[in-house]
Amino acid sequence: MRTIEVVDLTKYYGSFLAVNGVSFEVKKGEIFGFLGPNGAGKTTTVRTITGVLRPSSGEIRVLSYNILDEREKIKARERMGIVPEMANPYVDLTAMQNLKLMGELYGMERRGIEKRSIELLKLFDLYEKRNVKVRAFSKGMRQRLILAMAMISDPELLILDEPTSGLDVISARLIKDVIREEKRKGKTIFMTTHNMVDANELCERIGIIREGRLIAIDTPEKLKQLVKGSVSVEVSFEPMKLEPSSLSSAIRVELTGDKARIFTNDPDATIRELVHYAESNNLRIVSLRTLSPSLEDVFIKLVGDGND
Amino acid sequence: MIEMLKRSFAIAKKDMHIFYLKGPVVIMGLIFPFFLFLAFMIGRNLSGGHLFVGLTAMTAFFTSTAVGPTIIPWECRGRTFERLITSPVSLTTVLLGDLQASLYFGLAITFTIAVPAMLYLSIHPSIVVFLLSTILAVGCFSAMTVLMSSYPPTDIPADVMMLSSLVKFSLLFISGIFVPIENLPAYGRWISFISPLTYYVDALRHSLGGGYLPVWLDLGMLIIFALAFFLTGSWVHRRVLERRFT
Ligand SMILES: Nc1ncnc2c1ncn2[C@@H]1O[C@H](COP(=O)(O)OP(=O)(O)OP(=O)(O)O)[C@@H](O)[C@H]1O
Ligand SMILES: [Mg+2]
């Protein structure tokens, strides 16, 4: 079951090629993360999927509707919730009024809007402020409201362009919890982000885009396997001293402050060597741990210095 | 279709909530026509009917065009526009909602000014002609704001406001309010025919038993202008939509 299907999507702004032959699909019920440096083409891709921008070429199907067809586009939108990049609620309306407006735009009936709004306001910890104009809301509160607005009709697909960017830990966590809960209820989520930790925690599959091209698409763990040799062992001795040449299994050793980080292809051998080294030099082991590559390592390796 | 009207009404409600409370709107929509009207009246010995036509026409014209041109630039500026057009409504529905906001505001203010003026000046216009022409005219001017807001695709409301004021004033002076069209030289009359306001002024004069063109032509032209404004406005909006997302 495919919820989003993008085939050979290309988008030019004038003569500038922003998205170049991107193809991917998002399966029903998964959280798909779209990752890339600034200016990579994430928002452009999102906007073609939501039907704000017309692609220069390519096909886009959402919930089996052809987004390039005006009528089908509106049908698809009835069933999806959208958080555009840096979108705002109406600051001259209250939280409740913003939700009501969205409910009406989704063609819901008054009773249903009321009930769902209260539910969402409570979920996003905004209930106390429901009758306050959004002008007085903090950034985190606005972003929570924006997500609540996208969820007013309990849509089966959520498209979120950087839902957690610039938020404090509490707001970001709340939003991530909601996203996870939606997924548990069987909803599909397509989200863009810069935040590797979020992507790693939330997404089942990740697409990495760079300069308009999709350069990798896989599960976070499989992507991590792409970066070989970046498994490392971190050790701290007391007193701290380490002779790099005494470790035959090390590829590279970084000494930083009271720690050493040893990159290796064989963590098992490295740990044995370190323990042996400590014994023969009469050192106390303060800490010892293995570090697997982070998604950030993958990202940096794949994207390199390709930032705009 | 009904669903579309319902949703456009939701948009109109939102517009009225938000935009009719902004300062420039009050100035352009209410205070401005008031001073224009003073300028129009003072030092001239005008009949009650003449005053009524001038006041009503200017009020209708300025109130119904006060907000419309700036709604979409405001939305872009406030970063609410993408949210709005990614909801399950077409661009036409959005524009129809914005048009309705102008329409309701225009009608409400025009009637609250025109009816007391009627009583005060003790004139008795033909109610049918007055009502029909006012509704059509306010609709027509509201549709004009759809066109005015379409180009340039800017997110600076002041820019649009300036341009649209320029157009509005040009139209005001060629529309037979200050000088009745039958007193204009032939070329002046031709120029006045490009302004929709001309036909409303003429229809109002008909309601008082005057008028220059046949009344059916006045009403017909208001309808034609309204349709032309809305259709070209929506067309231009559609064309420049992508340029609003930069
Ligand atoms: N309307 C536009 N006109 C011209 N160029 C544009 C326009 N919108 C985006 N671009 C360019 O297209 C490229 C992709 O932009 P896009 O906004 O999709 O990137 P992004 O991946 O979302 O970046 P960010 O992480 O900063 O949000 C950028 O180089 C940008 O400068
Ligand atoms: Mg972006």
Image (tube, coloured by chain):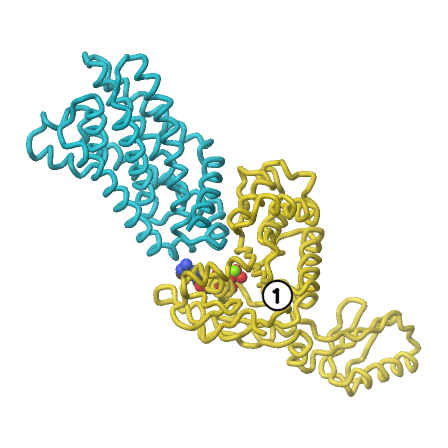
Chain colours: A yellow, B cyan
Q: Chain of mark 1?
A: A
Which residue is at 72% across, 83% downward?
A: A251
Residue A57 is left or right of residue A241, and the answer is left
Q: Quadrant of the C terminus of chain B?
A: bottom left
- Of residues A239 and A133, which is closer to you in this image? A133
Residue A259 appearing in the image: yes
Q: Position of residue B2 (x, y in %)?
A: 44, 48
Q: Could you say where residue A286 lies in the image, as x and y percent from the top left?
A: 88, 69
In front here: A45 or B113?
B113
Secondary structure under the numbered disc 1 in the rendered image: strand
Residue at x 63% of width, y 72% of height: A205
Three-letter code, disc 1? Thr
Q: Is residue B185 left or right of residue A74?
A: left
Question: To which residue does mark 1 refer?
Answer: A188
Residue A284 against residue A172 in the figure, above or below: below
In the image, residue A90 sits, relative to residue B175, either above or below, namely: below
Looking at the picture, tell me which residue is in the foreground, A141 or A71.
A71
Q: Is residue B73 visible?
A: no
Residue A296: name its quadrant: bottom right
Indicate the position of residue A232 as horizontal and vertical percent values.
75, 77
